[in-house]
Amino acid sequence: MRLATVSYQGEERIAVISGHGDSAEPNTACHMLPEQFGDMVDIISAGDETLSQIKGWIENNQASAVAFEQFELLPPIRRYRRDILCTGWNYLLHFAESKGKREGQDVDLPNAPTFFTKAPSVAIGANAPIAFDSRISAKWDYEAELVIIIGEECRSVNVEDAMDYVWGYSMANDVSQRDLQRRHGAQWLKGKSIDDTMPFGPWITTADSVNPEDVWIECYVNGEQRQRASVKQMYFNIAQLVAELSFGMTLYPGDIVLTGTPAGIGNAMEPPVYLKQGDEVEVKGTGIGVLKNVMKHQDLYGNSSVIIPNTTAYK
């Protein structure tokens, strides 16, 4: 089952997406759920019984389907209990391609997952414009990633049981500002947390509907393929990520975890190729969904006195 958060007739609603494609197409429709089910975090927290109730409701209300032209896809999670949880360097080829290009911040291949966080204000919908301001950064980059959604409160779970706590899957484009990453030392919060820059969605595909090992992750910029890898190529698999992330730290229903990006980022190209105004970035996950977003100017700089080298503010 695929559940989305949508804007419909001026209201945020939870909808079940029908059709068989990975993106919202003319044959796609959605069934708007009654408000009694709550928001996405409520549904996730309520567990399997509520999913069964939703399936039953859909079967008895087929006539309530709404055509895709009538709704707008929003980020599936709208209510966050914490920052967005992220994984770095989780594909070996990606780790290798950036060697010597981290501007003095190179490290040895880690023997445990590398975690960091992003501010929730980054999240935008599957087709929304990505905020772009050349005064903020001169090095805008893309990162296609599989997202896992935690379904049950847990702490220090055994790796053998970890998949039981994954409620579903989605996709994200972890748009990054490489110069901001380097500017603030060997941590990535700032270079990953610029407002309205992370496409997330298009919906959540429940864990019983997809085998993550069958998922291929792809990224295209203006129609040119930049990234393609199988989830099976992860250095630390999903169960290991959940076990390590939950070690001594409580995870909550509705927490989202980005699982890392494959090789092919713009910063690692020779010479580097960064995103610019008007670029279209498409991220795909087999059986999960498609994000298609255009880089569009938005005033992110405001009245700031901060000057980043090589940006238009610097010039």
Image (cartoon, grey):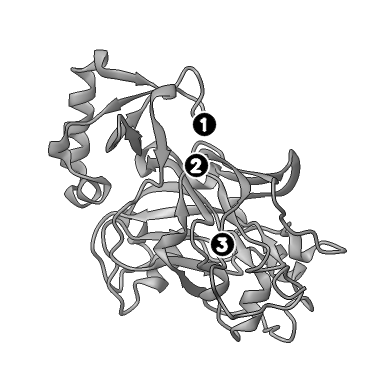
What residue sits right under mark 3 in the picture?
A: 260
Q: Residue furthest front?
A: 303
User: How many other residues sit within 10 Å of disc 1, few (<14), some (14-19) or many (≥20)?
Assistant: some
Q: Residue furthest left?
A: 36
Looking at the picture, which amino acid does disc 1 mark?
Ser
Nearer the camera: disc 1 or disc 2: 2
Q: Earlier in the sequence, mark 3 or mark 2?
A: 2
Nearer the camera: disc 3 or disc 2: 2
Nearer the camera: disc 3 or disc 1: 1
Spatial distance from mark 1 to mark 2, Cα to Cα?
9 Å
Looking at the picture, which amino acid does disc 2 mark?
Ala
Circles 1 and 2, Cβ within 8 Å, touching? The answer is: yes
Circle 1: element type? loop
Toward which corner of the image does residue 246 lie, by quadrant? bottom left
Circle 2: element type? loop
Indicate the quadrant containing the C terminus: top left, top right, bottom left or bottom right. Answer: bottom right
Above or below, comparing residue 286 to residue 186 in the picture: above
Above or below, comparing residue 196 to residue 285 in the picture: below
Could you say where residue 168 lies in the image, as x and y percent from the top left? 37, 47
Spatial distance from mark 3 to mark 2, Cα to Cα?
19 Å
Using the image, tell me which numbered label, if any, was put on residue 126. 2
Could you say where residue 82 lies in the image, as x and y percent from the top left? 32, 68
Q: Earlier in the sequence, mark 1 or mark 2?
A: 1
What residue sits right under mark 1 in the picture?
A: 23
